[in-house]
Image: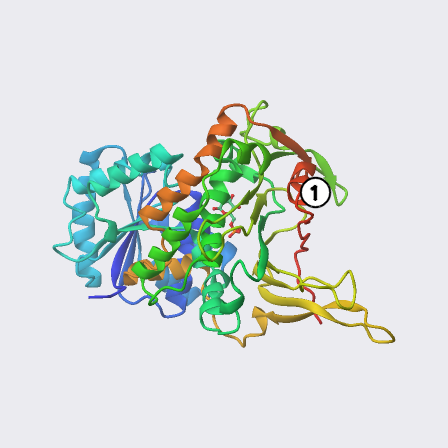
Amino acid sequence: MQTNNNCIVIFGASGDLTHRKLIPALYNLFKFGRLNQFSVLGVARSELNDDTFREKMREALLETEETTPETLDAFCSHLYYQAVNTSDAADYGKLVPRLEELHTKYQTNGNTLYYMSTPPSLYGVIPECLAAHGLNTEEDGWKRIIVEKPFGYDEKTAQELDVQIHRFFEEHQIYRIDHYLGKETVQNLLVLRFSNGLFEPLWNRNYIDYVEITGAEAIGVEERGGYYDGSGAMRDMFQNHLLQVLAMVAMEPPAIINANSMRDEVAKVMHSLRPLTQDDVEHNLVLGQYTAAEIDGKEVKGYLQEKGVPSNSRTETFMALRCEIENWRWAGVPFYVRTGKRLPARVTEIVIHFKTTPHPVFSQNAPENKLIIRIQPDEAISMRFGLKKPGAGFEAKEVSMDFRYADLADEQVLTAYERLLLDAMKGDATLFARTDAVHAAWKFVQPILDYKEAGGRIYEYEAGTWGPIAAEKLIAKSGRVWRKPSGKMKKKV
Ligand code: BG6
């Protein structure tokens, strides 16, 4: 039975993600009437109890969400807490009576959603400890487990993690969350492509010159230096979020929209990425690290001065890559992907650059045709093309036709975590990463990890710039330039 009546068990309940993302997402789902019979059981080592956990979550919600005292009280009454030593299997026994009590109280038929919001070192441990008490079996209601990224650290550890989790949970029970897939505008990409006859005939190597994908952030690593230093832009953003976005741009239409056919198509793209050679990592890849600078009159630290970052760190905070997809649709079309922290703006966008006319009739500098898909912020789609400049002659000028998401009435749009939590409760895995795609993505990026490991070059770039000059040179080799998006789309044509 598909039901979102369940108990949500959050491991890592005293952590950052729980109060910043998960509890606010559950609160909003509750407020919008999307949750009926449910309870949330926070689990962590800290010696909290139901009351102190509720108090902490209440404070967090008051800080970030629009609340009313009634809704807040009503929501918090669904929150519970159980202290567990999460690396000690015997201690998980405490969860058995707790879950029984909550399932009975809320009539949730044993349906349980486990959320691993813990350090990744526990991802293999928690499933085993749950299984030691039979808390993974689906005889009495469904049991699903959400795994936060990173799913492994490289190809080998990702495989090991998979084996560990699969010993106790079957693939249909495992939900690997990539919050980019929960973003409304990422999903809109599929609707744009597959519900319009207009784009499909053009969406291939015959008409597309190249594709640019940018995931830029203006912030630095903030308080997460310790975590980030073990990760870097490649593991933090590229291997997961940006490759998933690339897959949405490049995938074939699924036969139907369901979890398996969608994820089959995503996996096919990941498998079709042309393997990176030594030449690619040396010439089609740029890794960078930000240095101190003054931005808007304020001193901004360099990466090496950030809290938790070793002063000799070689972790990249920027990466740009030219890659290709080896299939009939895309053969020969370069995909330029870049991501970085401390860039001039926070913006995630895809630019489809169409080929120019075969012969320039009116002017040598006719504007390029581009479709710009702005994922965030200021979600929008903009079609750029040339029209005649008023006046004498036939000089062309770039104009744009813009659609802005904000113009779509007052529809209540779910945030990524709201959407994905709800989907997991409903048993819809369409927007969750499947094991084969995750492995193919790791396999693809492994040469980058090896290159870095072998002392590959990390360029410096000043905070507040668009990354190292080498990244400009990378795209300039083919006579192209990166778009330099601002945080805002143009308002008017
Ligand atoms: C997270 C990364 O997965 O995604 C962060 O760990 C990054 O480093 C964040 O800042 C970006 O997400 P969004 O939704 O703000 O683009």
Residue at 43% of width from left, 49% of height from top?
19
Q: Is residue 367 above or below residue 472?
A: below
Three-letter code for the amino acid on which mark 1 is drawn:
Thr
Residue at 36% over, 70% down? 33
* Most foreground residue, 217 or 246: 246
Question: Visible in this render: residue 376?
Answer: no
Horizontal arrangement in the rendering, residue 300 relative to residue 49 (left or right): right
In which quadrant will I find the C terminus? bottom right
Observer-nearest of 409 and 450: 450
How far from the left and from the top, in percent, is residue 1?
A: 19, 66
> What residue sits 63% from the left and 46% below the top?
218
| Residue 281 placement (x, y as % from top left) | 54, 34
Q: Position of residue 485 (x, y in %)?
A: 67, 55
Q: Is residue 343 left or right of residue 108?
A: right
- In the picture of the structure, the residue carrying the numbered disc 1 is 465
User: Foreground: 46 or 9?
Assistant: 9
Q: Position of residue 228 (x, y in %)?
A: 50, 35
Is residue 418 visible to the viewer in this orientation of the structure? yes
In the depicted structure, whether residue 291 falls above or below residue 389: above
The quarter holding residue 285 reads top right
**Residue at 26% across / 36% down in the picture?**
125
